[in-house]
């Protein structure tokens, strides 16, 4: 039987570049080689696409770009090709691809952009589609969908770029509603870049300006004192939720530029919560997954407040896929080791490739 040709796309121009490299290196090492032929495409921080024929170790340490065997490459949007076009010494060639695993986080990767290209190409891929990735990346859209499905989130307000000349008024309105215990964040961000915790009027204005330097929309949430719970959801028609874990990190901020740090390092499984809370958290995670149109996989972050309320924080459609990542650790609880997890995600993408979304 011919092997399945699986392309792994990694890197990208977003802040999460190094995190993508770390995930991709481990994924490539754990793809079953008796079943898959692996093709690697790296995207540099400046946005250049390169076919990479080297080792996972070069990806992990960031030296992959210096490999002299790298050649220019891109995924063809023409479904006739269904593959990658490489360019070397002015000559082009096509490498046929059966499935793509895009390990790209943040803007121009996890926000629906790469998914749109893959939809045009006709090549099956792991994970959610354009609209879902965009809606999960844009926290204002996530909030609105959750509101429509009666899933609680932290109370929130949106400030748009059109209101930038009225920031004093908007900040005063929001403070009158929520007070000054706030979280301010860019609406579109795959990491903690531009996120601030606010306690004074001066901090509030500075935080909004910082968030605007990262995006053209800003989310302001009323600060919630809560425990941080985590769920992994996967599947298509009947998505399945993992046991619930808990991040115990004492306000640690993870920098995605440092791939030696993982939020999974502070994950406790199972979370020390009642069976009733566990059941409800899993139900919320699956409902949110369905409501946003997720497919394949997602990491769902939840808050458990001091009053016992469960709030949805965010959904990541392209979670980290290192063995130490939150998603991978939660999936271990369902019996998937790292190799089995990667195989399952690729296999499901191929099996569901004929769907129309």
Image (cartoon, grey):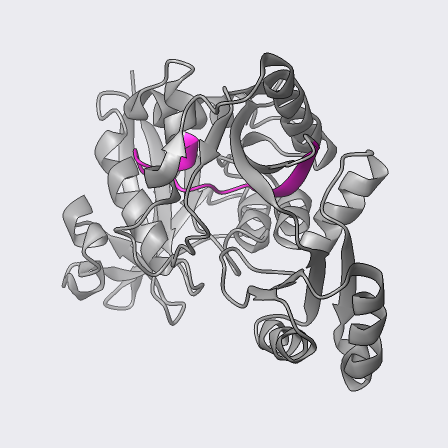
Left/right placement of residue 232 relative to residue 164 reads left
Does any portion of residue 356 appear in the rendered image? no
Toward the viewer: 355 or 199?
199
Q: Could you tell me residue 103's position as x and y percent?
A: 41, 46
Does any portion of residue 166 appear in the rendered image? yes
Left/right placement of residue 326 relative to residue 204 reads left
Identify which residue is drawn at 30% across, 50% down: 261
Quarter of the figure with residue 209:
bottom right
Residue 110, magenta (yes or no): no
Q: Could you tell me residue 312's position as x and y percent?
A: 66, 39
Quarter of the figure with residue 202:
bottom right
Quarter of the figure with residue 2:
top left
Q: Residue furthest bottom?
A: 165
Q: Which residues are magenta?
A: 309-327
Q: Could you tell me residue 118's position as x and y percent?
A: 53, 46
The N terminus, quarter of image: top left
Identify which residue is drawn at 78% across, 60% down: 178
Identify which residue is drawn at 63% across, 20% down: 277
Q: Relative to residue 45, is residue 137 depicted above or below?
A: above
Toward the viewer: 45 or 3?
45
Identify which residue is drawn at 52% across, 55% down: 190
Q: Relative to residue 217, is residue 279 depicted above or below?
A: above
Toward the viewer: 122 or 217?
217
Left/right placement of residue 352 relative to residue 249 reads right
Q: How many marks?
A: 0
The C terminus, quarter of image: top right
Q: Relative to residue 335, is residue 165 depicted above or below?
A: below
Residue 322, magenta (yes or no): yes
Toward the viewer: 331 or 42?
331
């Amino acid at each position: 039987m011919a092997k399945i040709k699986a392309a792994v796309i990694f890197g990208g121009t977003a802040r999460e570049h190094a995190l993508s490299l770390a995930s991709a290196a481990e994924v490539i090492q754990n793809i079953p080689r008796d079943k898959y032929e692996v093709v690697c495409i790296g995207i540099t921080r400046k946005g250049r696409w390169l076919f990479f024929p080297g080792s996972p170790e070069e990806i992990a340490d960031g030296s992959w770009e210096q490999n002299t065997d790298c050649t220019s490459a891109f995924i063809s949007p023409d479904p006739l090709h269904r593959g990658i076009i490489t360019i070397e010494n002015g000559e082009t060639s096509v490498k046929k691809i059966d499935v793509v695993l895009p390990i790209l986080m943040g803007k121009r990767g996890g926000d629906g952009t790469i998914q749109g290209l893959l939809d045009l190409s006709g090549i099956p891929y792991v994970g959610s589609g354009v609209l879902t990735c965009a809606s999960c990346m844009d926290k204002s859209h996530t909030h609105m969908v959750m509101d429509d499905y009666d899933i609680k989130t932290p109370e929130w307000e949106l400030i748009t770029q059109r209101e930038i000349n009225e920031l004093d008024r908007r900040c005063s309105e929001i403070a009158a509603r929520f007070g000054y215990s706030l979280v301010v964040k860019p609406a579109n961000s795959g990491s903690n870049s531009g996120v601030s915790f606010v306690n004074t009027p001066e901090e509030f204005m500075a935080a909004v300006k910082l968030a605007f330097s990262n995006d053209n929309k800003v989310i302001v949430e009323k600060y919630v004192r809560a425990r941080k719970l985590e769920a992994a959801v996967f599947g298509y028609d009947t998505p399945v939720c993992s046991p619930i874990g808990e991040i115990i990190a004492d306000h640690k901020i993870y920098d995605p530029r440092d791939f030696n740090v993982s939020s999974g390092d502070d994950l406790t499984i199972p979370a020390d919560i009642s069976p009733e809370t566990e059941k409800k958290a899993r139900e919320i995670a699956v409902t949110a997954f369905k409501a946003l149109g997720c497919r394949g996989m997602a990491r769902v972050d939840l808050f458990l407040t001091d009053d016992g309320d469960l709030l949805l924080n965010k959904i990541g459609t392209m979670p980290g896929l290192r063995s130490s990542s939150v998603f991978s650790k939660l999936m271990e609880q369902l019996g998937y080791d790292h190799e089995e997890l990667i195989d399952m995600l690729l296999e499901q993408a191929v099996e569901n490739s004929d769907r129309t979304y």
